[in-house]
Image (tube, rainbow, N blue to C red):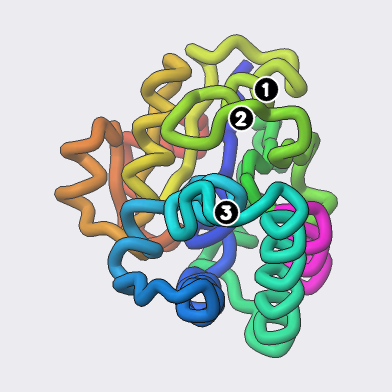
Amino acid sequence: MIAALFDLNGTVVDDMRIHGEVWRELARGLGHDVPAARIYRDWAGWTAEDIIAQIAGNAVSAETVREIVEEKEARYRERFRTQVAEVRGCAAFLRRLRATGVKLALATSAPALNRALALDTLGIAAEFDRVVGPEGISRGKPAPDIFLAAAAALGVPPQCCVVFEDAVNGVLAARAAGMRAVGIATAFTQDELRQAGAHWTADDFLSLPAGLLSALGLK
């Protein structure tokens, strides 16, 4: 049995620009000017709490962290709901995998309301057998925890899982979990994703390599 595990932001949905804009606004409110590249690249796959710790250190209380997280996600949803878009070819690829009998899971640090907004708007919620979020996950990417939890939820051994990711931290997490990784080059170049350990890379889901499709039983 083969399973395919998907990151959400930047992999299934094309939304990293919006996340970056909101994080920069919030960082400025805390007195920090954070370069966009650090948000898009260094912090990709991190939990919101970990990102706030990087911005503000120990300067804010746990209660303030929760308030900042709620504000960030509310601003993101307000902007994203009018701009929901998939990474090219993703929805059709999910349906093709499901028709072939591949088990599917979403494994993302995005909170529940964000996940629902993206999946419901794109009409792909039913394609996933399991959705695993950050709830109960102690470590964010590049730790393997969320991918191992998704594999366990599907009842599939890690070595039988293929992970689709857009970020170096996500590829590192997949490899640490003992899984094969596919790098979708929306935030990083294909070379950067391969250097991180991706077995296959592509610009989107319409240009996936033949070797990957064969490994998934699609060719």
Q: Is residue 145 visible?
A: yes
Cα distance in 3D space between marks 3 and 2: 22 Å
Classify 10 Å Cα crowding around label 1: few (below 14), some (14-19), many (20 and above): some
Q: Is residue 88 visible?
A: no
**Residue that mark 1 sits on:** 149
When asked about the image quadrant of residue 148, the answer is top right
Instruction: Where is residue 137? Give x, y as percent.
Output: 68, 29
Classify 10 Å Cα crowding around label 2: few (below 14), some (14-19), many (20 and above): many
Give the mark nearest the N terminus, 1 or 3: 3
Kind of residue indicated by mark 2 = Ile
**Residue that mark 2 sits on:** 146
| 192 to 79, vertically: above or below | above
Residue 53's mark? none
Q: How many marks?
A: 3
Kind of residue indicated by mark 3 = Phe
When asked about the image quadrant of residue 115, the answer is bottom right
When asked about the image quadrant of residue 79, the answer is bottom right
Residue 119 is covered by the magenta coloring: yes
Q: Which span is picked out in magenta? A: 111-124
| 109 to 174, vertically: above or below | below
Magenta part, dominant SS: helix
Instruction: Where is residue 62? Give x, y as percent.
Output: 71, 48
Give the mark nearest the N terminus, 3 or 2: 3
Kind of residue indicated by mark 1 = Ala
Cα distance in 3D space between marks 2 and 1: 5 Å
Asked if disc 2 and disc 1 are in contact, CB closer than 8 Å, the reply is: yes
Cα distance in 3D space between marks 1 and 3: 23 Å
Left or right: 22 in relation to 202: right
Residue 174 is covered by the magenta coloring: no
**Residue that mark 3 sits on:** 93
Q: Quadrant of the C terminus?
A: top left
Asked if disc 3 and disc 2 are in contact, CB closer than 8 Å, the reply is: no
